[in-house]
Amino acid sequence: MTDQRKQTLQELQERFGAKLEMEERSPKRIYVLVDKTDVPDVIRFMFQEQGARLCTASGIDGRWGVEIIYHFSYDGQNMIVSLKTLVEKPFLKIQSVATFLPAANWIEREIHEMLGVEFIGHPDMRRLLLPDDWPEGEYPFRRS
Amino acid sequence: MSYTIPIGPYHPLLEEPEFFKLKVEGERVVDMDVRIGYNHRGIEKVAESKTWDQDTFLVERVCGICSTSHPIAYVNSVEDLLQIEIPERAKYIRCVVGELERVHSHLLWAGLAGHFIGYNTVFMWAWKYREIILDVFEHITGNRNHYAMMRIGGVRKDILKEDIPGFLASMDELNEKNDMLTKAVIDDPVLHARLKGVGILSKEDAIAYGVLGPTARASGYDIDVRRDEPYAAYDLVDWDVIIMEEGDVFAKAAVRLLENTESIKIIRQCLERLQSMPEGDFFLPVEDFPVGEGIGHHEAPRGECFHYVRSDGSNSPIRHKIRAPTFQNLPSFKASCIGETVADVTLVTASIDPCYCCTERMVTVEDNEGNQMYDGQDLIRLSQEKTEHIREQMKG
Amino acid sequence: MALKHLPLKKSPWIFHLSTGSCNNCDIELLDCLTPRFDVERFGILLVGSVRHADALLVTGALTRQCVPRLKECYEQMPKPGLVIAIGNCACSSCIFRDSYNIVGPIDKFVPVDVYIPGCPPKPEAMISGIVKALGKL
């Protein structure tokens, strides 16, 4: 792993300490487990101070909740850091990051309509991809 | 007094259906909203019921123009999951196919943009010279579009040595035509007056919205997956990333046309290496899929194409996330469109090179009583008339 | 063949509708207008409004959102008019038939005169299909 990558990850670890559980699957792919309440702060740090770019966010339905993975690319350092968090059922609420990161606006709308996760504080939570006559409460990506 | 203009969902040269709502005051746009969903085919869900190999064909059909971009990003993600490295021959072939697609896509865009501003000859020429590339594709892969060249572990077909001189000659011809087109655009004073200063996206907005591809590079945002995280043969050949600072429609057009020259350079170098390399394997057989996750991305003609897969060891992915570049680029339309005139709207939309089928899966201007003032054809006509007006002014 | 169909046979004006396609069929259709295939010399023109069209060319697997538009376009097309399904998706929904948002193929909602399969069908195939459709009249 290059020095620059090590430094970036060290900065991240030092800033948030035990709140982050980092796993290095390969030199270019880092997976970080974080609690949902810490997500906005970590993302704010990664985007505003470290200059990471949000690629996208993946939502996966599971037994205990919906797992949301925010994928960030550190372009100059050849590394993607994926921030994983669990949004528990039945409440399925998490703070939106679209207020300070416009790049997350549409992807949060998509996860909301596909999986039913509520993003608190999202500036414009409306239907994005599903047709107007799609029934409310029906989430295509839910498995159960 | 403000009016709302819905644009869409169908009009002839925006081949895909979409629905824009523009709020105008006088001649200026003050707000914008876009409703997509007409092309949403639920591909991510379908992918969960297909096997890993079938998915390569499925994702090809996410988009027709960037047909090989999604398969490259997908096989990159599966190869990340498997932690394997493909044979060198396959790397060069992937590069050739990826770059040929870039040139074809940019020429397609140049033709459409030419039509929107009233340069119909540009449309006809750009699409005519595109045929050179489609012929090369048909020769290598058997199809003009949807080439099905990618497989997990390599590529599906080899490029034969005896064909390479013919392809190199085609590249020479293509380079000549592309140069002609580039000079025609960059040196035309009417186009300068028509396109410069229109639809500016600032670098701060570009970073905030996370835009990608030529849309980002035209605003000075220096990102390119081929250089930032090299895959295939991009770190084995010589080429440059094209960056411009202005962020207007002219910069976006220039970036795309100049990128074509770089792409042709890459293709030539890859073909020459393939010619001098000994015959060899072009794929690695893959047997089992471990439990795990994989991330892959590729610089498609419109920007970064991102795929994420999760495996539980079975024959199908349990989650396959597809994010096409236009999904990130479209929302930025709000920032670049506000303040522009109605006549420029089609051009500013077209300049981000939107590919709605990738994103998902048109224009009438109404006054406050809902009476139609302009429709889709009218807006294109307004755009073409503005160009004519500028041309007249320059003559006089 | 009835007298009113004679002008139709000479130079059909076509309206193109995409109901949720990957866009490849649409690009190959537009390719027919370009110098290599140049269908305009046969009088085939792409028109901007379905009210002027003699033939409706439909591509795409038909998403839920597009159904009312497809029906509307078919109704607004002056009769006699042809409906031509272009591409595997329009003919049979192809790989998308199990998707939650696809309700096609299009012949569930509008009567189709000619099917042109292919992914995408080559421009030669499209021209041949349109000529066959005209022969039906």
Image: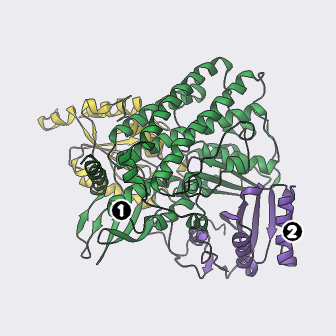
Q: What is the number of the mark on residue B315?
A: none
Label 2: element kind: helix
Vertical side of A118 occupied by B389: above or below:
above
Q: Is residue C20 left or right of residue A100?
A: left
Name the residue type under label 1.
Ile
Vertical side of B166 occupied by B375: above or below:
below
Among the 4 quarters of the image, the one containing residue B291: bottom right
Q: What is the number of the mark on residue B7?
A: 1
Q: Residue at x 83, y 76 (%)?
A: A15
Q: Nearer the viewer, residue A44 or B341?
A: B341
Tell me, yes or no, whether dots 2 and 1 are on the same chain. Answer: no
Using the rendered image of the protein, determine whether residue C21 is visible from the camera's viewpoint.
Answer: yes
Q: Residue at x 75, y 72 (%)?
A: A85
Q: Which chain did the renderer colour yellow?
A: C
Using the rendered image of the protein, determine whether residue A111 is visible from the camera's viewpoint.
Answer: no
Residue C93 is situated, as x and y percent measured from the top left of the image, at: 49, 47
Discs 2/1, front: 2
